[in-house]
Amino acid sequence: MSTSDGAFAGRVAAAMYERDRVAHALEIAVDEVRFGYARCSMTVTEQMLNGHDLCHGGYLFLLADTAFAYACNARNDVNVALACTISYSAPAKAGDRLVATAEERVKTNRTGTYDVTVSGKSGTVHALFRGTSYQVNAQVIRE
């Protein structure tokens, strides 16, 4: 990947983020994006806790899905989720800063497979997510 590829992926991510109401509402940061890769982060708030005082799994899924979205759309071709699975391995608590790192594993003409690891500050892996994307006939940045 050339430096210009990374800059272009950053422009695509910025355009997506401008319209991403969920990421804004939950204060999800898009920390890094390049073709087939994205890293996003968020802090677990009191409002994200379930009845056990742990981060609800839906928020872990949401963070992983967000990183997945930025990774699979980085080339400016609009991709949507075709299928996603998640396995939870450790609880997260209020105040934890979570980082979701998405990496492309396979990319074909219309589909892609991405693995996302959601981890905490100490390196604890909270969840493993796998997403399959489907490319539609549209672009993120309409030039």
Image (spheres, grey):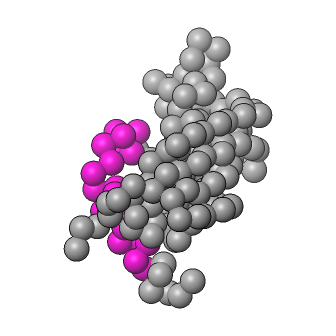
Identified at 65% across, 50% down, the residue is 116
Compared with residue 93, is residue 36 higher up or lower down, i.e. above or below? below
Compared with residue 44, is residue 108 higher up or lower down, i.e. above or below? below
- In the displayed structure, does residue 64 sit left or right of residue 140? right
Q: Please identify the quarter of the rendering in which residue 135 is found.
A: bottom left
- In the displayed structure, does residue 35 sit left or right of residue 7? right
Q: Main secondary structure of the magenta part?
A: helix
Identified at 76% across, 44% down, the residue is 124
Q: Please identify the quarter of the rendering in which residue 140 is found.
A: bottom left
Magenta stretch? 7-26
Identified at 46% across, 24% down, the residue is 47
- Residue furthest to the left in view is 143
Q: Is residue 97 visible?
A: no
User: Which of 126 and 76 lies nearest the eye of the viewer?
Assistant: 76
- Residue furthest to the front in view is 109
Q: Where is residue 130 in the image (x, y as percent from the top left)?
A: 66, 45
| Residue 142 sits inside the magenta stretch | no
Image quarter where the N terminus lies is bottom right
Identified at 67% across, 36% down, the residue is 86
Q: Is residue 92 visible?
A: yes
Image quarter where the C terminus lies is bottom left
Across the whole image, how many numbered discs are drawn on residues?
A: 0
User: Which of 16 and 109 lies nearest the eye of the viewer?
Assistant: 109
| Residue 22 sits inside the magenta stretch | yes
Q: Position of residue 64 (x, y in %)?
A: 57, 44
Q: Where is residue 106 in the image (x, y as percent from the top left)?
A: 66, 62
- Residue furthest to the top in view is 51
